[in-house]
Image (cartoon, helix red, strand yellow):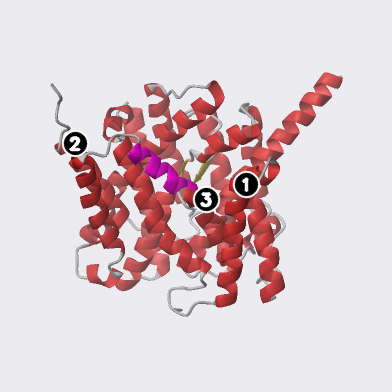
Amino acid sequence: MKTETGSFIGTSLETTQWFVFLLASSVALPIVIGSIFELNFTEIAGLMQRTFFAVGITSFLQGVFGHRLPILEGPAGLWISIFAVMAYSGVESGKSYIETLQTLEAAMLWTGGFLLLFGTFRLAHRVLFVFTPLVTGAFLFLLTVQLSGTFLQGMLGIQQQVEAIHSTEAAVAFFTFFLVLGLSLFGKGALKSYAVLLGIVVGWLTYVVTINGESERDADVAVFQPPEWLAWGPPNFEWSVIPLAFITAVILLSNIVASVVAVSQSIHGKPSYTYSQVNRGSSFLGVTHGITAMFSAIANVPLASSSGFIDLTGQKKKRPFLYASLLLVIIAFFPPLVAFISGIPAPVANAALLATFVQLMGLGLSNIASQELDQRRLTILGVSFLLGIGLMFLPAEVFQGMPGLVRNLASNGLLVGTMFVILLEQLWKEPKHS
């Protein structure tokens, strides 16, 4: 009896800890997207509800049927980049925000379809050769560069039509940023494990005290309500997003491998993956892209940060992870709980997320530096970074006269830079030493 009780308590604590990690990793990005698309509180709360549901159900599906590892399926940084770029370019081309979101639903469905085909026909592992350390490192570096601008705008209180910096909001945001960073670097035990969650809570309280922020509330919110189906309306299928979807699908395959390798290292002590694991992961990543698109959320991918959580907590069992995923799904059916969490101020959420990207930037640089940076590799990086980052500084209106196909690709510096790294790495072969 004591053994059963101890096992129950241990599993409950491990489930709670996984749940907090899933929650902390899911809470910021809906607020970031809400600020980019100027959604009101009710719309952000709905997006938060659908995000919790999508993260829970997709993590469970991958854990049971896909790659079958305890890996959090969280909102993808690449998709945040695509959302941000298309928000700006959509406005410049005369689209409303809701029309752009409907186009993004279609883009996620197309991407999911490609991923499903890659996995079903066992093609996923055949394209892995393109993801060399140089390509992976360059992608992570460009991702952090592109998203840092979006997050910094949110920290400074700058919205689409507001150009003045809100000094008080900015001060609270930077306090949150350095708090999360400090806890993750110098904290011990729980302080380090829950640096993001603690930073958000302290930053939120500081925001309320210093700015006297009263979050908007919907008094008529239902106690129980399932997540809304197609909340942004029906998908708007445009031919111009198909190439974007295909390139995104290929790049997302690297997420599967990176996450599986990292978590295998944490659980089994050695980095490993099988071709069937990658193909199953790709198939179910396609399915989960379809789920997130139909529930109008941000497409999820396996997050390599799960390995850091396992290393910190020593939790290697899959069952508590699956329980936590289902618990997040259940929470999504209770809007009052979701609405409370949605009250987190955008500057605080952006700051906490930017702090987590410090480690991602470091991971990218480590991948790049893992091989000798000879003249060939330095030239590939130089060309790709100059073109990719250069495009990020161009205003969205310069692409206005271009066809939709060209605009969606050329206006995204992350995709262009990554494509150049891949192409140059494959076409410019390394000289063979005799």
Residue 73 location (% of width, % of height): 51, 41
Crowd around label 2: few <14 · some 14–19 · many ≥20 (10 Å): few
Q: Of helix, strand and loop, which one carries label 2?
A: helix
Relative to the observer, which residue lies in front, 52 or 120? 52
Q: Position of residue 87 (x, y in %)?
A: 38, 65
Picture quarter with the N terminus: top right
The magenta stretch is 359-369
**What residue did someone put label 2 on?**
426
Tell me the kind of residue under disc 2: Gln
Tell me which amino acid carries mark 1.
Answer: Phe
Picture quadrant where residue 103 is located: bottom left
Number of on-image labels: 3
- Between marks 3 and 1 in the image, the one whose residue lies nearer the viewer: 1
| SS type, badge 3 | helix
Name the residue tied to disc 1. 186
- Looking at the rendered image, the quarter that the C terminus falls into is top left
Query: The residue tagged with tag 1: helix, strand or loop?
Result: helix
Give the residue pinned by disc 3.
356
Q: Is residue 287 above or below residue 414?
A: above
- Please determine whether, in this image, residue 184 is positioned above or below residue 314: below
In space, the residues marked 2 and 3 are separated at their CA atoms by 31 Å
Of the numbered discs 1 and 2, the one sitting upstream in the chain is 1
Task: Find out whether the residues at labels 1 and 2 contact each other: C-beta distance under 8 Å.
Answer: no
**In the rendered structure, which amino acid carries the disc numbered 3?**
Thr
